[in-house]
Image (cartoon, coloured by chain):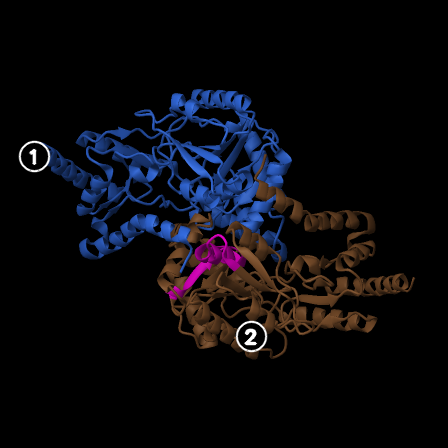
Chain colours: A brown, B blue
Amino acid sequence: MISKKMEDFIANGSAIRAMFEEGKQMAAIYGAENVCDFSLGNPNLPPPDTIKKAILEVLDEEEPVELHGYMNNSGYEDVREKIARSLNDRFGTSFSQKNIVMTVGAAAGLNVAFKTLLNPGDEIMVFAPFFGEYKNYAISCEADIAVVPANIPSFQPDFESFEKMLNPKTKVVIVNTPNNPTGVVYTEETIIKLADILNKKQKEFNTDIYLVSDEPYRELVYGDIDVPYITKYYDNTIVVYSYSKSLSLAGERIGYLVIPEAVADFEKVSAGANMATRILGFVNAPSLMQKVVAKCLDSKVDIDFYDKNRQALYNGLTVIGYECTYPDGAFYLWVKTPIDDNEFVKMARKYQILLVPGTFFGCPGYIRIAYCISPKTIETALPKFEALMNEIKEKIKA
Amino acid sequence: MISKKMEDFIANGSAIRAMFEEGKQMAAIYGAENVCDFSLGNPNLPPPDTIKKAILEVLDEEEPVELHGYMNNSGYEDVREKIARSLNDRFGTSFSQKNIVMTVGAAAGLNVAFKTLLNPGDEIMVFAPFFGEYKNYAISCEADIAVVPANIPSFQPDFESFEKMLNPKTKVVIVNTPNNPTGVVYTEETIIKLADILNKKQKEFNTDIYLVSDEPYRELVYGDIDVPYITKYYDNTIVVYSYSKSLSLAGERIGYLVIPEAVADFEKVSAGANMATRILGFVNAPSLMQKVVAKCLDSKVDIDFYDKNRQALYNGLTVIGYECTYPDGAFYLWVKTPIDDNEFVKMARKYQILLVPGTFFGCPGYIRIAYCISPKTIETALPKFEALMNEIKEKIKA
């Protein structure tokens, strides 16, 4: 018999896995070119050329024992220093290597931060819609998730509910901007308001509330949209970063935490993150990739590709009659469903379209379309989405 | 305020960290060449040349989107299949890719296995001396650690105590052979006896007891010592493997679990390990390194180097009068201390020798010497160990 918690995880996780399996079966029946899989946020752009170049350079420059061996659990000091300086250059911050903890991607970064901060029964507050995996990470720390209802249609935070819901048990608030699944970017005004409320509530409750900024999509923004660097607005901010999307290195598991000296109990949080990295079994972020990303801090994937997909999907679906949230960042389109979202996802499968229901993100009545896919898939999908809309209209009439 | 558990971890973990810091300070005062740091199991041999070659080949052969992107949380199917076949060739097993889960090293593998199997209050049984980190992993699952006393001087398991201590709460038994810290390899006779007792107790309690075989040191054995492949002797065996030592890739965090179909509830354990890899925040083992190790399954580091260190240390210390366990594997020498082990470690520091006390491994009265270091360090250390022994003899006389 396996663990009871794990039994539940498997039962809950089976819906998305079932979708993958169904996708494979569909491809076998209808041909892969007719299946439109919009379910996974797996970048389909290659990493920039600088990555391969950097790997080759690192292999030539570094001493192999050092390159492939253990280092401080928080990562190589030189890598952390380079990342700190790059952040300082870009955002006017003043970090050094001691503010950076290299992590096995953002998923590891979140687990390290939660493990460091949370006692059983503490509360993590999230804004709907939110990345469903946060719930699983919370369960590992025996923390509770409190969900601030979605603010429709802007999907900026609902401040009224947020302020009411904050309580002395709230230890962590997560923001994720650019947002998965909506593609919304929080404005500077939003961040200032958020910080004001948090500061007020910290004072009122005499507690520390840590704002955990999960930002794997920071570099994926379109046009001249600005993504404010949150440590500058609120002292108790911990940034969780990943190169999965910006450098298309999702499989390599490489990212970092920023723990500014301004956070409450900095020394302990910092020592805790180092320790959590070790005892959660990560030990350290993959060593070669640490050295590689340090050489590619000014690179990113070809955003224009995602932008074209974004325009094609947004315009295509809007014309058909779908109500879409215009995404300023990330590679997801958030679409209102004219019927129940689970029902919609089920109907879409008949057209060989794979989607994730809003329910997974704590926000029913919507679906998420991941557009980190081939433009051809969008072309194939649009007539299918139209047929689906017509079928639904017929159904509603009947 | 950080989490209470983390406060404890930091307090307990500080002794070894303090040692590292002291090592640095010593190097500054006495010169790095005079400091003998035997504390860390960080391989000092470069990876075999095949590793760099394999990285270059993989970069040329694989499509970058596939190479650096997400795959099944359990790892690339082709990599898992190659590992399974290599095991079958070497050990006469009959695994396929579905029995292999790629992990972020052995530390991750252990966490994944524990998370999959253990409910709060379940018991993990270990044989003293044992790798201290198991305790921290157990705490994460709210499991209890039960320590079977050391069997001195063979350091094979104490079967009488083991049999008495097994109880209906025992869900996992860990074996680690070749052993850290003793260097002892369990004989085939030991494994057969272990399996007999476990089978008897499973029947008596009507429970499943999983034998978790933590074997990062499997390839590091000297002479013609045989390390039995445990899945062949006991059905409920899960193997935790890592390339950290065999290929000197400790920083790259790459290893795997073997979950044979013979284990109780195979389908659930397998699905659980896949899910645990995801929700613990590993997501998957680093992608490029998966492909690299799959090309290097027949490679290993230059064992002769460690063997020479082993002989030099064992012979050198024995002549001085230290009582050492002769190590058949791994790169540790386990030495009896004529006084309290913590006291011994403290005295050794005066001679600029850094050691880990047996207490850390649940076995006071011993120290561990990691000999994955330069032969020069051994040369420098031997006269220091002699002076230390003389000082202790004087002290005891007085």
Q: Which mark is residue B398?
A: 1
Q: Secondary structure at mark 2?
A: loop
Pick the residue in front: B377 or A310. A310
The residue depicted at 47 percent of the width and 74 percent of the height is A200
Identity of the residue drawn at 55% across and 55% down: A144
**Residue A249 seen in render:** no
Q: Residue at left 40%, top 60%?
A: B1
Q: Could you tell me how far apart the alpha carbons at marks 1 and 2 are, in whole angstroms?
A: 71 Å
Q: Which mark is residue A96?
A: none
Residue labelled with disc 2: A227
Q: Position of residue A75 (x, y in %)?
A: 41, 57
In the picture, the quarter occupied by the C terminus of chain A is: bottom right
Closer to us: A392 or A388: A392
Q: Position of residue B289 (x, y in %)?
A: 52, 49
- Badge 2 crowding class, 10 Å Cα cut-off, few under 14, some 14 to 19, many 20 or more, is many
- Image height check: is A236 above or below B49? below
Q: Chain of mark 2?
A: A
Query: Which residue is at the front of the view, A218 or A127?
Result: A127
Label 1, secondary structure: give it.
loop
Same chain for the residues at labels 1 and 2, yes or no? Answer: no
Quadrant location of the N terminus of chain A in the rendered image: top right
Outermost residue toward the left?
Answer: B398
**Magenta highlight range:** A97-123
Percent of width and height locating residue A320: 83, 70
Q: Is residue B324 visible?
A: yes
Mark 1 neighbour density, 10 Å: few (under 14) some (14–19) many (20 or more): few
Instruction: Name the kind of residue labelled 1 in the image.
Output: Ala
